[in-house]
């Protein structure tokens, strides 16, 4: 699991939340597969609503401006971000996200390599509502922070017992399908960034390492 801090800053979170709090919400099972529908209890913005599209655009712009997201996910396609809310008693039992997400009324489809949750409520504003992926510590982040995790993992959201947990969620098809290859590229990328900050970025060894990064990406990327 990779945490991307402050994808949205405090001002952007306030603005998005003000619009979400005034929006119309529908039953969250509108986007569920059969397995999920049994486990899922929450509300979400209708996928084709003008507000969901506008707010999703704000999230997409923020993702494009996040070097950490781009380095970690190596995104090829991002499913238009959706928005959900878990009130008291809501939760989402164990499930695996659908492998292919097809946008209703279009031919836009995404293979879900990575799932993303962008938290839009402060952790202090609700109890429960933790994202738990198999074998991982529960995740509950500050508003504006995002977590990326393998869409193939069994995961759940614990029931909310106080307040409301509002979030944006979506899926990413990566240029690099294999999670271990993607993790190695991310590690190499971060190491190169650290070395570049500490040493002469034009040093021959750094130039060779950067070349290795790109040549591995060239080998593994599917476009
Ligand atoms: Ni899920």
Image (cartoon, rainbow, N blue to C red):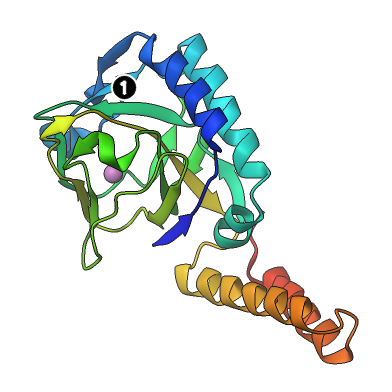
- Report helix, strand or loop for mark 1: strand
189 lies above or below 120? below
Give the image quadrant in which the ligand numbered 1 is located: top left
Judge by depth and name the residue closer to the eye, 80 or 220: 80
Instruction: Relative to 208, say whether 171 is above or below.
Output: above
Tag 1 residue: 44
- The residue sitting at 41% across, 17% down in the picture is 20
Q: Position of residue 18 (x, y in %)?
A: 44, 16
Q: Does the rendering let one see residue 108?
A: no
- Which residue is rendered at x = 64% and y = 49% of the image? 66
Q: Is residue 151 above or below residue 201?
A: above
Q: Is residue 209 left or right of residue 204?
A: left
**Foreground residue among 203 and 186:** 203
- In the picture provided, is 182 more to the left or to the right than 20? right
Residue 68 at least partly seen: yes
In the image, 37: left or right of 205?
Answer: left
Q: Is residue 39 left or right of residue 164?
A: left
Pointer 1 residue Cβ closer than 8 Å to ligand 1: no
Q: Residue at x 56, y 29 (%)?
A: 11
């Amino acid at each position: 699991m990779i945490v991307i801090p402050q994808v949205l800053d405090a001002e952007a979170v306030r603005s998005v939340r003000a619009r979400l709090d005034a929006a119309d919400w529908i039953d969250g099972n509108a986007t569920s597969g059969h397995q999920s529908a049994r486990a899922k209890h929450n509300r979400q913005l209708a996928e084709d609503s003008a507000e969901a599209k506008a707010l999703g655009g704000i999230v997409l712009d923020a993702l494009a401006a996040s070097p950490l997201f781009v380095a970690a996910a190596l995104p090829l396609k991002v499913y238009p971000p959706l928005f959900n809310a878990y009130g008291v008693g809501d939760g989402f039992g164990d499930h695996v996200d659908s492998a292919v997400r097809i946008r209703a009324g279009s031919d836009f489809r995404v293979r879900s390599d990575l799932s993303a949750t962008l938290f839009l409520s402060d952790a202090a504003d609700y109890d429960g509502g933790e994202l738990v992926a198999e074998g991982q510590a529960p995740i509950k982040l500050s508003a504006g922070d995002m977590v990326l995790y393998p869409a193939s993992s069994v995961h759940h959201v614990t029931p909310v017992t106080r307040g409301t947990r509002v979030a944006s969620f979506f899926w990413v098809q990566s240029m690099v399908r294999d999670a271990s290859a993607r993790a190695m590229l991310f590690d190499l990328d971060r190491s190169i960034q650290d070395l570049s900050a500490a040493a002469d970025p034009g040093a021959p060894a750094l130039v060779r390492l950067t070349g290795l990064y790109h040549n591995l990406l060239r080998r593994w990327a599917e476009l």
